Image (cartoon, coloured by chain):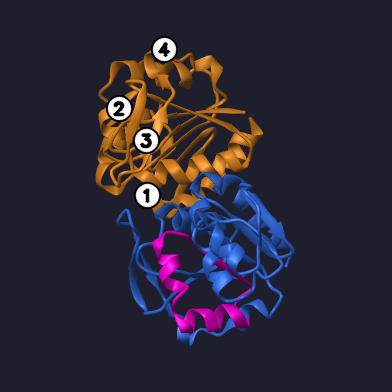
Chain colours: A blue, B orange
């Protein structure tokens, strides 16, 4: 199974690194895409290498999408290339996971309309503006869309993420 | 299952936080002990709360031990209360996991003598001085002792940790 992470500088370190290791533990392949190819730095200083430029990535090549949080996700939501990719991926009916500010990218791509979802509490109004039904729960699963609020939700979130990804 | 993490300030953040979330995903209870009770800070700035002072902890109360790395582990290896606890725990024949500088604590407690183990490459000589058989592998399992070298080993390490902990 091939998973694509989408991020950029300013990601919440634990929301990218812990899930990446967790998915690799399942022997899934994890690729990282950013608006620009190369090193991407988390807000606590961890770095990861974005091996793909989002504008060059093919949605069909990936079995599932994962969007970590942090301010990175707010910036991503303003990138046309990111929104275009996420829109196309959303039409494939494949699993999409997002945590904290990550769901804002899904909202901006219009794929949360009428769907149950959660996110970091300070930006929940943005989900509602995009037509989502916001729920204040550690993890919300609506079909193949799995969302969570914050790093402390990672245990419950990853349990559901693995379940939905494996069922794909 | 109740797991005890032993650490102190200066831990390698991902080596504590990612495994903690991973074990909580399995519905294990995670307690954190430090030489002094209270907030403990990782080298990248993440904080966790040590709910136990190691001198007050009872080895029999825990099903397994987990020692993350970072400079914290080198400091821990010089604390009498830590060494005494780990020695006692080692006599219980229960699982012990340690990563990076974490295995130095096991070495200092004398429980790696004649055992296969790994650790961060720069301090491998300390394992050998303590009578361990050092192996440069992502994860080494010798009975109920599971060791790993560095953060990038976490996927393979945690797979074995979960296996050994669950078999207990």
Residue A14 appears left or right of A153: left
Q: Are marks 1 and 4 in contact (CB under 8 Å)?
A: no
SS of the residue under disc 2:
helix
How crowded pointer 4 is (Cα within 10 Å; few <14, some 14-19, many 20+) is rated as: few
Is B20 or B83 nearer to us in this picture? Answer: B20
How crowded pointer 1 is (Cα within 10 Å; few <14, some 14-19, many 20+) is rated as: many
Q: Are marks 3 and 1 in contact (CB under 8 Å)?
A: no
Quarter of the image where one finds residue A12: bottom left
> What segment carries the magenta color?
A61-88
Mark seen at residue B103: 3
Residue A79 appears left or right of B28: left
Q: Nearer the viewer, mark 1 or mark 4?
A: 4
Quickly name the residue at label 2: B76
Whether discs 3 and 4 lie on one chain: the answer is yes
Above-or-below relation of A142 to B89: below
Q: Are marks 2 and 3 in contact (CB under 8 Å)?
A: no
Quickly name the residue at label 1: B150
Quickly name the residue at label 4: B56
Above-or-below relation of A70 to B89: below
Whether discs 2 and 1 lie on one chain: the answer is yes
């Amino acid at each position: 199974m091939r998973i694509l992470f989408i991020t950029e500088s300013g990601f919440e370190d634990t929301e990218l690194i812990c899930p990446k290791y967790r998915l690799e533990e399942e022997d899934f392949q994890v690729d990282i895409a950013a608006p620009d190819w190369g090193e991407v730095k988390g807000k606590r200083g961890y770095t990861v290498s974005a091996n793909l430029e989002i504008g060059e990535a093919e949605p069909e090549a990936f079995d599932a999408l994962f969007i970590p949080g942090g301010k990175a996700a707010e910036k991503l939501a303003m990138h046309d290339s990111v929104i275009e990719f996420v829109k196309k991926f959303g039409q494939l009916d494949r699993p999409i996971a997002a945590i904290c500010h990550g769901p804002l990218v899904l909202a901006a791509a219009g794929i949360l309309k009428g769907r149950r979802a959660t996110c970091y509490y300070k930006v929940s109004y943005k989900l509602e503006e995009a037509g989502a039904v916001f729920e204040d729960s550690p993890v919300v699963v609506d079909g193949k869309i799995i969302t969570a609020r914050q790093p402390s939700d990672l245990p419950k979130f990853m349990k559901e993420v693995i379940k939905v990804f494996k069922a794909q």
